[in-house]
């Protein structure tokens, strides 16, 4: 089989893994021999036709697999062409792509062949060839093989920048149903092991300058969204727990794309739940950068995201008691909660207001999206001039342009309300019986 | 302190020359309505003041910036000088005038029009430099790497460090077609050459093979159920596509017509 065919098969079979970041570690080549460096902000070298970033040569070592996970395109029972790279082929491709600035490094994963230990050893061989023979200083992300010996994971972690174990599905129940060869513990065990090893390593490198670094860019994981009935709230709480307990750097969400007909799964032809995935990433951002808790974004009563509004706008509309916010005095944490103000503009506001009182035109200069922020802020005690507050008006400004367009085509604007419920994407309900709608508007306009 | 005056300063286009314009404006206590690099004839209606480049005057301004304003301002002004806006010279002048009067505080005056405009230009420039780190594509010619770029800003000084560190043991060249300048790295020494011309030679068989391998990987990695050309264009603006391997056509591809490439007209990858 020639390289072209192999690369096609093993690239295609790796494509459903969402994570492709090269961030988290800064490493200069300096005067060393060899090639490569790493930049902590990560560098995306290309974007594929689906708009996803390509920063690493993301391939499987092989797509032969002993396991039969129902959601996976490489499952044992699936009839697809199979291939396998040798460590030399992987190293050659990586180096030659890297020299041409196509990629930032290698993302190596694999189907399970013979045994988890054997598979892990093969990965170690490929990665170690790159690091030791080719003196490759670029980024390497390796998959920890569930069930492999912890000692092997240790060896892999010293060679790679980032290690990940995919949690795959958000609950034990879903795992039992769809991934009979995996269990929650076989996933969480290595994850916990890696977390401990990273922590331990942070002491070692303080003590001994030359101690080898263990996965300096940390650990990440991914979950498949929409293959099982787990709710957004469950998923978000799980992410929050993993960021906390396992100190994960990233949790990736991957909208399920049907790979062949399976009884337990959405049928082929089902569109991947991209909006849901998008909302999860938005909420994920709120957890990591905006100081939100999962319980603030969703709760037992509201287990699904509002399809019309992003989670931050949704939160703001449900918490009129927190607004309006005085731009010239509000603490940074509160500025972050205003729709239309992001991390960068909040930081700029804090800097700029040290020098002068800020007014609405100033905010625009600082990159605040006024059409959204207007409803939630005051500048020196004043509202934006000529601001008309109607429920439909606010909704219109807070929704994304594409949602607005979609709604207009359906003629659904008339009955729009703040509290459009998640389950009725297609038929927008008339004003629900919640008494607070009017109150909210009044509160927002400062009439109350 | 400064009076606006109907005059255009004309300098030689060097950074020192611009610092001399700043010097001149302080001596005359005035703000010109424009600054041009090199002689421009259409400006006959306004008075033109030729500002000769005097290393001594430039050094005085150059030293005063970190001392009287801030070291960060010195860095910012140097980046601002690489930007492409027509009024960039005047903007730098106004920024420095203000900086010398308020001191280091100017860094925080984000809502000020001059400061804001300058920071925006700098932002555009650093973003483009970042894009270059992402999207530059090298070709291998018998061990020498070469790449052509067409940036709006003069990004080469901003990306030199990144590439010389990354490819420290290679020999390479990055040619900026817009500004006719190049970063040349040879035997572990980097140099920026100006006013040169370079044309990419034809690729050899091995180079073609890796290009094709990359293209086939690029097509394989896309998920067709998630096809989203708009998102791709936002993240990777089309004006950079011209020099990117993913979108180039070549002889090898025509011969091996079985592989479909997502060319300039994006089409769906085959499953």
Image: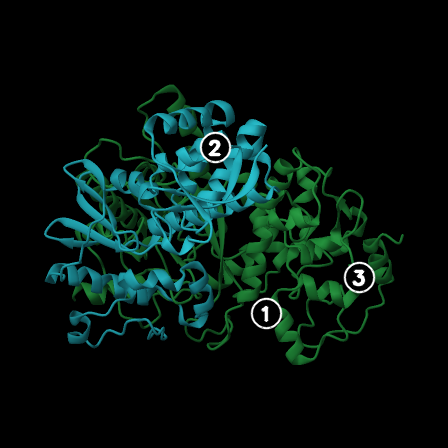
Chain colours: A green, B cyan
User: Where residue A82 sits: x, y (%)?
Assistant: 26, 66
Does residue A368 appear left or right of residue B21 in this picture?
A: right
Does residue A184 appear left or right of residue B254 in this picture?
A: right
The chain containing the residue under callout 2 comes to B
The chain containing the residue under callout 1 comes to A
Q: CA distance from mark 3 to mark 2?
A: 43 Å
Nearer to me, B266 or A387: A387
Q: What is the quadrant of the N terminus of chain B in the image?
A: top right
Which type of secondary structure does the marked residue at label 3 adopt? Answer: loop
Q: Residue B205: tell me if it is visible.
A: yes
**Residue at screen point 48% across, 34% down:** B25
Q: CA distance from mark 3 to mark 1?
A: 22 Å
| 3 or 1: mark nearer the eye | 3
Q: Which residue is mark 3?
A: A389
Q: Which residue is mark 1?
A: A402
Nearer to me, A439 or A422: A439
Nearer to me, B66 or A166: B66
Q: Please determine if labels 3 and 1 lie on a single subunit.
A: yes
Does residue B162 appear left or right of residue A346 in this picture?
A: left
Q: Quadrant of residue A113?
A: bottom left
User: Where residue B178 sits: x, y (%)?
Assistant: 30, 55
Q: Which residue is mark 2?
A: B73
The chain containing the residue under callout 3 comes to A
Q: Is residue A425 above or below residue A370?
A: below
């Amino acid at each position: 089989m020639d390289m072209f065919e192999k690369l096609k098969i093993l690239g295609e079979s790796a494509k459903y893994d969402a994570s492709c970041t090269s961030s988290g570690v800064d490493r200069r080549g300096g005067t060393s021999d060899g090639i490569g460096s790493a930049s902590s902000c990560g560098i995306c070298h290309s974007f594929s036709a689906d708009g996803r970033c390509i920063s690493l040569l993301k391939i499987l070592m092989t797509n032969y697999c002993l396991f039969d996970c129902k959601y996976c395109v490489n499952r044992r029972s699936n009839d697809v062409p199979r291939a396998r790279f040798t460590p030399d082929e992987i190293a050659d491709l990586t180096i030659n792509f890297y020299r041409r600035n196509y990629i930032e490094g290698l993302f190596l994963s694999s189907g399970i062949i013979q045994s988890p230990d054997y598979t892990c050893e093969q990965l170690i061989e490929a990665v170690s060839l790159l690091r030791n023979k080719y003196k490759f200083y670029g980024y390497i992300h390796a998959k920890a093989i569930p069930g492999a010996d912890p000692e092997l994971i240790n060896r892999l972690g010293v060679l790679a920048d980032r290690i990940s174990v995919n949690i795959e599905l958000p609950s034990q129940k879903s795992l039992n149903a769809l991934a009979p060869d995996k269990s929650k513990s076989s996933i969480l065990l290595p994850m916990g092991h890696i977390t401990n090893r990273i922590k331990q390593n942070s002491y070692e490198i303080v003590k001994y300058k030359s101690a080898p670094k263990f996965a300096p860019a940390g650990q990440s994981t991914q979950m498949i969204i929409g293959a099982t009935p787990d709710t957004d709230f469950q998923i978000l709480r799980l992410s929050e727990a993993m960021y906390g307990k396992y100190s994960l750097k990233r949790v990736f969400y991957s909208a399920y794309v049907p790979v062949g007909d399976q009884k337990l799964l959405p049928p082929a032809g089902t569109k991947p739940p991209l909006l849901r995935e998008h909302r999860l990433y938005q909420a994920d951002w709120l957890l990591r950068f905006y100081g939100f808790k999962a319980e603030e974004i969703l709760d037992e009563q509201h287990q699904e995201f509002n399809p019309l509004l992003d989670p931050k706008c949704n939160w703001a509309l449900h918490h009129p008691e927190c607004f309006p916010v005085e731009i010239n005095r509000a603490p940074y944490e509160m500025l972050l909660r205003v729709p239309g103000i992001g991390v960068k503009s909040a930081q700029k506001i804090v800097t700029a207001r040290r020098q002068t009182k800020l007014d609405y035109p100033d905010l625009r200069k600082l990159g605040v999206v006024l059409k959204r922020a207007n409803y939630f802020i005051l500048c020196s005690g004043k509202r934006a001039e000529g601001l008309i507050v109607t429920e439909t008006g606010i909704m219109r400004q807070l929704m994304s342009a594409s949602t607005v367009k979609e709604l207009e085509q359906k003629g659904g604007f008339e009955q729009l309300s703040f509290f459009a419920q998640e389950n009725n994407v297609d038929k927008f309900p008339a004003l629900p019986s919640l008494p607070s709608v009017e109150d909210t508007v009044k509160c927002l306009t400062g009439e109350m | 302190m400064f009076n606006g005056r109907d005059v255009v300063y004309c300098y030689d286009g060097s950074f020192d020359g611009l610092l001399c314009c700043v010097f001149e404006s302080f001596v005359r206590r005035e703000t010109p309505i424009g600054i041009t690099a090199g002689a421009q004839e259409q400006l006959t209606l306004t008075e033109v003041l030729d500002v000769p480049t005097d290393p001594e005057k430039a050094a005085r301004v150059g030293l005063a910036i970190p001392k009287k304003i801030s070291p960060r301002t010195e860095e910012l002004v140097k980046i601002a000088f690489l930007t492409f806006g027509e009024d960039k010279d005047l903007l730098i002048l106004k920024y420095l005038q203000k900086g010398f009067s308020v001191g280091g505080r100017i860094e925080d005056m984000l809502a000020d029009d001059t400061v804001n405009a300058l920071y925006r230009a700098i932002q555009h420039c650093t973003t483009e430099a970042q894009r270059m780190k992402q999207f530059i594509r090298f070709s291998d010619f018998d061990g020498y790497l070469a790449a052509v770029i067409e940036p709006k800003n003069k990004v080469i000084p901003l990306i030199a460090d990144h590439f010389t560190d990354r490819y420290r043991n290679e020999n390479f060249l990055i040619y900026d077609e817009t500004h006719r300048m190049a970063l040349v790295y040879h035997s572990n020494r980097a140099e920026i050459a100006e006013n040169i011309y370079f044309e990419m030679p034809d690729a050899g068989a091995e180079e073609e093979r890796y290009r094709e391998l990359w293209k086939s990987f690029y097509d394989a990695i896309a998920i067709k159920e998630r096809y989203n050309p708009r998102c791709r264009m936002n993240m990777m603006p089309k004006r950079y596509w011209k020099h990117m391997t993913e979108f180039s056509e070549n002889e090898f591809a025509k011969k091996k017509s079985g592989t479909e490439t997502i060319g300039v007209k994006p089409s769906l990858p085959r499953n």
